[in-house]
Amino acid sequence: MPAPSRVKIVEVSPRDGLQNEKDFVPTDVKIELVNRLAAAGFPNIEATSFVSPKWVPQMADAAQVMAGIDRKPGIIYSVLTPNMKGFEAARDAGADEVVIFGAASEAFSQKNINCSIAESIARFEPVAAAAKAAGLRLRGSISCALGCPYQGEVPVAAVVDVAQRYLALGCDEIDVADTIGVGTPRRVRQVMDAVTAVVDPARISGHFHDTYGQAVGNIAAALDSGIAIFHASVAGLGGCPYAKGATGNVATEDVLYLLRGMDIDTGIDFDAVVDIGQWMSANLHRKSSSRAGNAVAAKRAA
């Protein structure tokens, strides 16, 4: 299948990139991050998460972040919502899209939320119905789609099953997420080809972590399967909680560099994203994890 001529990048650094930071990132910095990303041309930004501050203290200021950002027309501002309480807060905060999340691994589901995959997705039924009733976009994320920290390999059929369940809930978009970054291009092709056999490829996105350095190659493989939506995080923000010290999300700068080399349009200003990655890394007092971003920054400084 020929690679798409245009790709949508969902920028996840404000939520997935920051949620595991130990030191609280000031609310005004989060707001500025979202605003800078919007100015750089991202069509979809995962702005925050309406979860219990007890479990994710970094996201305790979700309502303030949503109230403080400068909304740009045409941009989808997404938020994670694990339950009805989260959904109601997200709706009241003016979210354009709510995100629900379940695993393709039974072991992961049992270990993390003490229920089966089917039970976990059934819990999202009221959230999905409320989102549709409110006219909001609904996105479903399939975690551990390419491997699990507890059970190891995850059957392709399990990923397809969750995708079909999300489709039945009315999800507009479905993320195939390599939560621990163990996927390789061949496996990505197998999974994406199986999922797109039952779900329109235009609704499928790839969410790859770079724990083993495979994320850019995995994106190239997904492009071959007709996938045209990818998640990324500036400076590679977002550590992998199951591999100590490992990088997490693929760096947006690296993804943009790949796509630019393939003449695939994103509508995003690459140089502005490099600046954002360097700025945000400085705010967090560490070096960016983006190879392309650091290479460009070093070249500029030379």
Image (cartoon, helix red, strand yellow):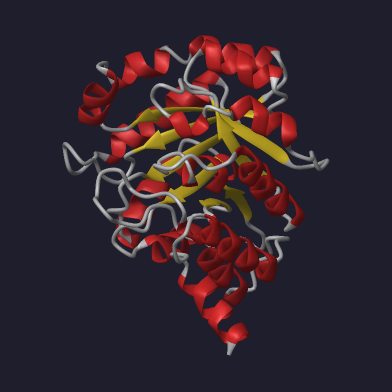
Relative to 63, say whether 115 is above or below.
above
Tell me what residue is drawn at x 42 percent, y 41 percent: 195
Dividing the picture into quarters, in which one does residue 213 lie?
bottom left
Residue 110 picture location, percent across and down: 23, 22
Relative to 115, say whether 270 is above or below.
below
Relative to 188, say whether 135 is above or below.
above
Along the viewing direction, whichever of 6 and 208 lies nearer the viewer: 208
Specify the farthest residue to the bottom: 302
Q: Is residue 86 left or right of residue 67?
A: left
Tell me what residue is drawn at x 55 percent, y 56 percent: 283
Residue 79 appears in the rendering:
yes
Residue 36 picture location, percent across and down: 71, 53
Residue 243 picture location, percent across and down: 24, 50
Along the viewing direction, whichever of 89 and 286 lies nearer the viewer: 286
Residue 221 picture location, percent across and down: 42, 62
Locate the C terminus by quadrant.
Answer: bottom right
Tell me what residue is drawn at x 47 percent, y 59 percent: 285
Residue 197 appears in the rendering:
no
